[in-house]
């Protein structure tokens, strides 16, 4: 009888331990999602689909650029969720919103900012074909990236950067890659 009770005790203990690990995994996933949120989903999903960009890449950019603060302003005076400068806004407007009477201040509106930002990301991806190089170009501009691509020590094919030599660019790309991987790990399996 004692052997039977001991086996039941160990089996119950093992089940409790398994349940505790399962609960911990759920709690940690929930906790991580606080740091990697899905916000402005309606706009991100709509424009990611329209411009053929992975929405998790968009979330990674928004998280890195503004921390999901639609009123964010950078040192370079870039505005909104996806941190678009006035120069970039003026360049994108005839392509993204021809005939619309939008102003630079409209970039504080989440829908407008996400629309322009995702469009620009799509152009960066189309131009470079690689998420990391596209992220570098979103951050530093096409001219900077094109110049680096001409140097064999930074690019073997003239299209993809092997390394990111500028400290800010390198830091930015690393943050985007890490956030993008985390979004994929947290949400892709769920289909959210």
Image (tube, rainbow, N blue to C red):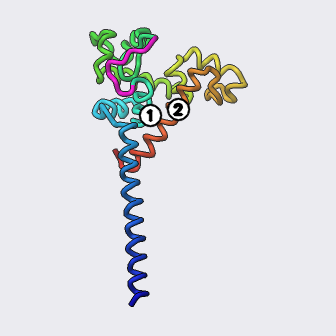
Counting from the top left corner in percent of width and height, residue 74 is at 42, 15
From the image, give the main secondary structure of the stretch colored magenta.
Answer: loop
Q: Mark 2, residues whose alpha carbon is within 10 Å: few (<14), some, or many (≥20)?
A: some
Q: Secondary structure at mark 1?
A: helix
If the image is split into quadrants, where does the C terminus sit? top left
Residue ID at (40%, 9%):
86
Query: Can residue 115 be seen in the rendering of this structure?
Result: no
Give the residue number, with chain letter if any, for mark 2. 131
Q: Quadrant of residue 143?
A: top right
Secondary structure of the residue carrying tag 2 is helix
Residue positioned most to the right:
153
- Residue 73 can be seen in this image: yes
Give the x, y percent position of residue 160.
Answer: 61, 29
Per the rendering, the mark at residue 57 is: 1
Q: Which one is nearer the viewer's eye here, 31 or 107? A: 31
Residue 187 lies, with reference to residue 125, above or below; the image says below
The residue under the point 51% across, 31% down is 175
73 in magenta: yes
Horizontal side, residue 42 vs residue 182: left or right: left
**Distance from Cα at disc 1 to Cα at disc 2:** 8 Å
In the depicted structure, whether residue 117 falls above or below residue 49: above
Percent x, y for residue 87? 43, 9
Which residue is pictured at 39% across the width and 59% down the height? 22
Which residues are the magenta region?
Answer: 67-75
Q: Quadrant of residue 97?
A: top left
Residue 51 in which image quadrant = top left
């Amino acid at each position: 009888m004692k052997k039977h009770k001991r086996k039941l005790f160990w089996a119950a203990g093992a089940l409790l331990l398994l349940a505790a690990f399962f609960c911990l995994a759920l709690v940690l996933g929930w906790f991580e999602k606080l740091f990697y949120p899905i916000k402005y989903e309606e706009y991100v999903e709509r424009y990611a689909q329209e411009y053929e960009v992975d929405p998790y890449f968009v979330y990674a950019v928004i998280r890195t650029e503004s921390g999901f603060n639609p009123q964010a302003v950078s040192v370079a005076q870039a505005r909104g969720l996806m941190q678009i400068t006035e120069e970039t806004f003026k360049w994108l407007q005839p392509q993204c919103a021809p005939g619309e009477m939008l102003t630079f201040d409209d970039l504080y509106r989440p829908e407008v900012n996400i629309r322009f930002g995702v469009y620009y990301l799509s152009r960066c991806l189309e131009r470079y074909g690689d998420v990391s190089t596209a992220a570098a170009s979103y951050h530093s501009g096409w001219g900077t990236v094109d110049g680096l691509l001409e140097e064999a020590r930074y690019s073997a094919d003239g299209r993809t950067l092997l390394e990111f030599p500028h400290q800010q660019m390198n830091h930015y790309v690393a943050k985007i890659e890490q956030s993008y991987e985390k979004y994929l790990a947290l949400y892709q399996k769920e289909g959210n």
